[in-house]
Amino acid sequence: MLTSQLPSRVEPYKLAARDERLEGLVALNQLARLVEEAGDQTGDCHVVLEFGIDAQGRREIRGHLQADMLLACRRCLEPMPQQVESRFVLGLISDEALAGELPASHEPVLVKNEQLDLLTVVEDELILSLPQVVYHDEKECNVSPEQLVSKAKGSNDTTSPAENPFAVLNALKSSGALKGKK
């Protein structure tokens, strides 16, 4: 079933029994937790969800999502385009205790009263798919190469040998203060 907007709530067990496929868009600005994590977003996330029953009789959702987002560069904090994409397999469970019975390839998704909030599922997958760190290429970044090198305050460009942390012990040893102590 192709829809322009993905429905917010579905009955996943019925969809799985009929091997249904949902394909549609979710507006990124509707996803409050995503906006909190990644900042204001425009555009849509394209989502494909295939409901079915696997060989062991487990109801599952095989999904793929893709969104073009603007994420803040960790150097200059300016937004930069980033494509976020994810493929996932969700195992439908009616009780949290059943999550342990799913194979490692399946992420559990709790279905309450035979209803599933698809927007929450899509939002969770998008947040999990965000890159941990985003950087512009050094040539494109608004931070100069000199700013990328960390320097201690008051240090100059000449390299001096690092101070030996054991110099104090060496001084005590030569003065004889440590004789006879073990």
Image (cartoon, rainbow, N blue to C red):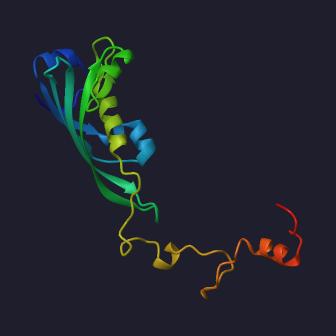
In the picture shown, does residue 127 fall above or below 168?
above
Compared across the picture, whether 75 is left or right of 124 comes to: right
Q: Quadrant of the C terminus?
A: bottom right
Res 158 quadrant in image:
bottom right
Q: Is residue 139 above or below residue 113?
A: below
Does residue 128 appear to the left or right of 1 in the view shown? right
Above or below, 61 against 157 in this view is above
Residue 83 percent location from the top left of the image: 27, 53
Residue, far top: 113
Snapshot quadrant of residue 142: bottom left
Point 23% across, 27% down: residue:
7
Residue 101: x, y in percent?
A: 30, 20
Please report the residue visible at 82 percent of the width from the left and 74 percent of the height from the top: 173
Q: From this viewpoint, which residue is outermost toward the front?
A: 180
Nearest the viewer among 156 and 29 is 156
Which of the 4 image quadrants contains residue 57? top left
Q: Residue furthest bottom?
A: 158
Report the front residue among 94 and 1.
Answer: 94
